[in-house]
Image (spheres, rainbow, N blue to C red):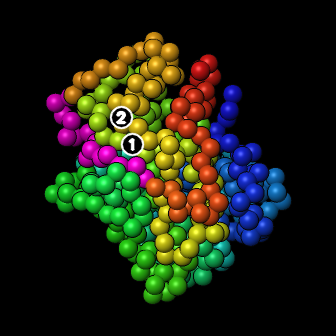
Amino acid sequence: MRKSINANQIINDTVIPWETLKNAVILITGATGLVGGALAGALSAVSNARGLSLHIIGHGRSREKGEVIQKKHGIDFIYGDIRQPHWLKSLPERVDYIFHCAAITASAQMVSEPVQVMTTAVDGTVGILALAKEKNVKSLVYLSSMEIYGQMTQTEVCEIDLGYLDLSNPRSSYPESKRYCEMLCTAYASQYGTPVKIARLAQTFGAGTPMDDTRVFAQFARAGVAGQNIVLHTTGQSRGNYCDISDAVRGLILLLVKGKNGEAYNIVNPQAGKTIREMAEMVAVEIFGGAVKVVVDIPPDINKRGYAPSSNFTLNADKLSALGWKPTYGLAEMYKNMINEWQGYNV
């Protein structure tokens, strides 16, 4: 049974120039989250396997979660609210690289706490960009989101495209703040020469995804494991874009050392895209052999649940692929890896 990210796949990646990172000090904000934690684990494993002597520093608010990451991966950890500057004083004099992953990503919070969603994104990114300038870092990767694209009319979306966001909807607090933060990155790159790259992540999961993840793909998997029907709270016509966590981590590290400053890159497996309904049917049939069914039950409080507006586009990954990156896991494999780790479920 595969455990967490596929560390061996990342260690053996020959596209990433690993020696570039030798003896580097790397800061990961939001290190208690799925992507930040996966980066911490991958870099720790690579450092040990390749003798890179990396000094990895994680940052997060939760001491309980941070201590787990620290113990599991043997990294240092600093605690504090990303919006407050106090924790920055605990950093060493030299910081070479930064992955800025800190963000509020729970959909329900985007509706119930839009102010906190926006200030965490904007104030946190202002602080990290100022830190990168002060420390004269070699590279910084800002984790943005495919949600910045909004509602698009075309069926394939590249990094130069942009769609509509409804600014009267508090749910837009997340994608709009991500757009603003991308503009901050562009401004720092232009005015100060800050070596920042922007990663627009598709929905990312696989081994390492916690069982209490609230996103819809995890809800489908939990239902199947429990032998319950998969319940859709919409008609499921919206199209999702996905990427395995191990593939995403390889892409992020590649961006760190080979990406072009001031530019954005989609990180996605274009072959893994499906509508929500298609994904639910795939999980029911391919993963659980038809033992569960897919039913539609639209709740009366649907607007409070923070679901993103319907979309029908596929992200283009050509720009990242041009750096040598290729996704390796399809959607069904992502589900199998995630469920195998959860319970050793035989799929």
Residue drawn at 41 percent across, 31 percent down: 279
Q: Is residue 340 visible?
A: yes
Residue 65 vertical placement versus 79 (above, below): above
Q: Main secondary structure of the magenta part?
A: loop
Residue drawn at 44 percent across, 41 percent down: 273
From the image, tell me which residue sits under label 2.
276
Residue 19 vertical placement versus 317 (above, below): below
- Judged left or right of residue 264, residue 152 is left
- In magenta, the rendered stretch is 299-315
**Dot 1 amino acid type:** Gly
Quarter of the image where one finds residue 137: bottom right
Q: Residues within 10 Å of mark 1 (few under 14, many from 20)?
A: many
- Judged left or right of residue 162, residue 242 is right
Indicate which disc residue 240 carries. Answer: 1
Quarter of the image where one finds residue 136: bottom right
Whether residues under marks 1 and 2 lie with C-beta atoms below 8 angstroms apart, the answer is yes
**Dot 2 amino acid type:** Ile
Quarter occupied by the C terminus: top right
List x then y, in percent, for residue 277.
Answer: 34, 30
